[in-house]
Amino acid sequence: MAEATNQFSSKAIAAAFCFAIMGIILTEGQQNFLAECRKKIAPGRCGWQIGNELYTGNVTVDQQCCGHLVDMGEKCHKELLKDYLSSPDHANVNATEVWQRSDILWSRCSKISAHP
């Protein structure tokens, strides 16, 4: 049993080390910032629209949700995206495509929101 515990502890330490190197372990301030960003955009259909446009390219964010995205701010948008892409659960996501879609989405939403 002690050997199994030692193996588990070694694996947990190795995993934590890998996450730290990859930048996945966030400070409390970063976690709070991301939580506030999520509150601004995630509830309801806008989070769904934005996520689907970015990650699948199969949905187009509407004008109202573009407004919410722009109101949230570019820093929130980019930090949420970085957080999503840094997760091991999303290792199979093509980050280059997502960042390209993100730039296109931000540009389009900024224009739409500036001219209601």
Image: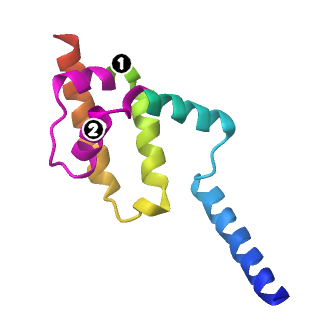
Residue drawn where x is 19% and y is 27% of the image: 108
Q: Which residue is mark 2?
A: 50
The local secondary structure at tag 2 comes to: helix
* Residue 75 shown left or right of residue 14 in the figure: left
What predominant SS class does the magenta segment belong to?
helix
Q: Foreground residue, 81 or 100?
A: 81
* Three-letter code, disc 2: Ile
Residue 41 on the magenta segment: yes
How far from the left and from the top, in percent, is residue 98?
29, 49
Q: Give the quarter of the image for residue 94.
A: bottom left
Residue drawn where x is 34% and y is 54% of the image: 95
Q: In the rendered image of this protein, does residue 65 appear above or below residue 85?
A: above
* Residue 42 shown left or right of residue 28 in the figure: left
How far from the left and from the top, in percent, is residue 67?
27, 20
Q: Give the quarter of the image for residue 74.
A: top left
Q: In the rendered image of this protein, does residue 110 appear above or below residue 10?
A: above
Cα–Cα span, label 2 and label 1: 14 Å
Specify the segment rendered in magenta. 40-69
Q: Foreground residue, 44 or 85?
A: 44
Residue drawn where x is 22% and y is 43% of the image: 53
Q: How is the image coloured?
A: rainbow
Q: Earlier in the sequence, mark 2 or mark 1?
A: 2
